Amino acid sequence: MDDNTLMTHVIAGEIDKLGVLYEKYKKPLYAYFFRFTGGDYHASEDLVHNVFYRVIRYKTSFRGHGSFASWLFRVAHNTGIDYHKKNRYTDNTRVEVGAIRAVMDENSGPEKEEQIATLQKALDKLGSFERELIILGKINCLRYKEIADILNITESNVKVRIFRALRKLKDIYIKLENTENEKAGSG
């Protein structure tokens, strides 16, 4: 049974079918929130549970158009926004270093660790929306269409915003790297 069909059963009152969806999506949602909260294990677990609470509460808003995953991550996005409003640190959202390391190749060493640390600093300097676009697009590897559905913007808008966010990240990274090289050269 596919996700949309399972959700149709949930809407019809077969709440036990939500268990199948929960088992399938709890890890990707946890990973999303873990990055979104900067590595807060407990908050990430709570947010995953909040998402599924909202799935039950707002189940009739799922119309079956598009993928269930896109709808679920839109719920997750809204849950994350509410979390940050409540905790008042939207601009302090951090991308977990482990997520960055997972995206970069397997080679390790002091130079790679410095690159990862510099990338973490550069990501911290981005705005929360830009960071989220990079998390969704480049770390979670969602398609532009899925991101557009989650953020409720057009697919072309997603492409432009991700391009701009990556360009800004690159500029910040280069400036940080140059500053660190200057410090190392003068020290």
Image (cartoon, rainbow, N blue to C red):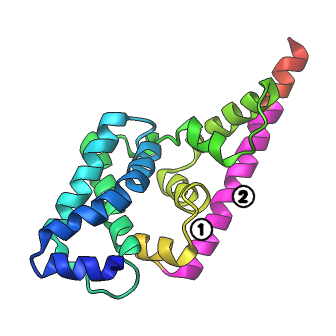
Q: x, y percentage for residue 21?
A: 30, 65
Verify whether residue 177 appears in magenta.
Answer: yes
- Kindly identify which residue carries mark 2: 167
Q: Residue at x 38, y 55 (%)?
A: 29
Please report the bounds of the magenta region as a residue range: 154-178
Q: Considering the numbered disc 2 on the image, is that residue within a helix, a strand or a loop? A: helix
Q: Quadrant of the C terminus?
A: top right
Cα–Cα span, label 2 and label 1:
10 Å
Q: Tell me the kind of residue under disc 1.
A: Arg
Q: Residues within 10 Å of mark 1 (few under 14, many from 20)?
A: some
Q: Residue at x 41, y 70 (%)?
A: 150
- First-in-chain label (2 vs 1): 1
Q: Is residue 122 visible in the rendered structure shown here? A: no
Position of residue 177 in the picture relative to residue 159 (left or right): right
Verify whether residue 123 appears in magenta.
Answer: no
Total numbered circles: 2
Q: Considering the numbered disc 1 on the image, is that residue within a helix, a strand or a loop? A: helix
Q: Tell me the kind of residue under disc 2.
A: Arg
- Kindly identify which residue carries mark 1: 161
Q: Residue at x 54, y 67 (%)?
A: 142
Q: Residues within 10 Å of mark 2 (few under 14, many from 20)?
A: few
Q: x, y percentage for residue 18?
A: 22, 66
